[in-house]
Amino acid sequence: MTQPAKITEIAPGCFNLRAPFTILAGIVDIGTHMSFIKLSSGKFVLLSTVQLDAQAKKEVHDLTKGGELIEAVIGTNPFHTLAFEQFYELYPNAPFYGTPRHIRKYKEIPWAGSVTDPAVLTRWAPELALELTQGGEFDDPQPESTNHFAGVVAIHLPSKTMVVDDCFRVSKNPGIIERGIFGRRDMEVSFHWSLYNDALYKTPSAVQTFHDWVLHLTKTYDFDNLSTAHGGILIGGAKAELVLGLEKARVALKKMAVARGGDLVY
Ligand SMILES: [Fe+2]
């Protein structure tokens, strides 16, 4: 029996592949994702990587014509690294761009560049905008076990789709804890929990910097859809949900800013 396709085109030219990713000694599967952005040239920019099983390998091969159409493979979150070795073995001729942590960790990959280079971030503009989260450490986030907030946020303008790993999260079928304790509803957009402890620099201005950067995303880019690594994919209304999420977070963010000697003005 043929299995359903693993790669899905969530919006025109924006393809998403979801894969299992377990935490807590393999007990809880929080899932993860990689994306394939089809440029007007017909080539693809790949955002992150996931472990590929046999079917996913075939689908990636078919979509990219055996890798011929891969223009770039980009490491987007410093801690989403585990599948890069496998992907490099499969596609050793593709240009890989990493976060500083990717580049430090996998020295056998001949990195074509770092996502901290503005020339890399703007290379595919205006079709594909790439931005780094602001207000927190991106090069070497600490503590490594929990501070996975920072990353590259990608916006594919033709399909109005934002792709992020950890900083934003779409709640998909929230369970009793998420609903009961955090008051989340289905398809609500919120922020990775580390925002409220280690994600941002503990300086007076970091909260304001982060807050204003989220607003900048909503004012600068026209997007309707949002794909998040460990949550769901929201098709339609994503910008309004992100704004609502920011509004909901403001009380806690302001308290945090004041505790760090600053303020949050909006
Ligand atoms: Fe993550």
Image (cartoon, helix red, strand yellow):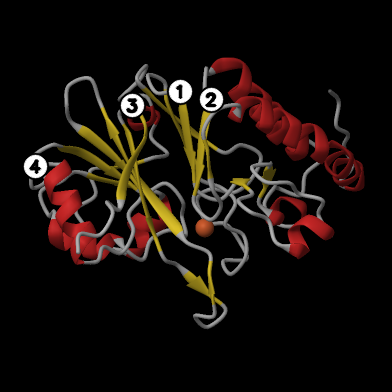
Is ligand 1 closer than 8 angstroms to the Cβ of mark 1?
A: no
Q: Residue furthest bottom?
A: 25
Q: Find the distance from the CA under tag 3 to the CA under tag 2.
A: 12 Å
Q: Find the distance from the CA under tag 1 to the CA under tag 2.
A: 5 Å
Q: Quadrant of residue 211?
A: top right
CB within 8 Å, label 3 to label 2: no
Q: Which residue is mark 3?
A: 12
Residue type, mark 3 in image:
Pro
Residue 177 seen in the current view? yes
Residue type, mark 2 in image:
Asp
Q: Which residue is mark 1?
A: 160
Q: Which residue is mark 4?
A: 65
Q: Nearer the viewer, mark 3 or mark 1?
A: 3
Q: Residues within 10 Å of mark 3 (few under 14, many from 20)?
A: few
Label located before the other in sequence (3 or 1): 3
Q: Residue at x 62, y 16 (%)?
A: 219
Q: Find the distance from the CA under tag 3 to the CA under tag 4.
A: 19 Å
Q: Residue at x 56, y 48 (%)?
A: 150
> Residue 206 vs residue 181: left or right?
left
Q: Which residue is mark 2?
A: 224
Q: Residue furthest front?
A: 1
Q: Find the distance from the CA under tag 2 to the CA under tag 4.
A: 29 Å
Q: Residues within 10 Å of mark 2 (few under 14, many from 20)?
A: some
CB within 8 Å, label 1 to label 2: yes
Dot 1 falls on a residue whose secondary structure is: loop
Residue type, mark 4 in image:
Lys
CB within 8 Å, label 4 to label 1: no
Label located before the other in sequence (2 or 4): 4
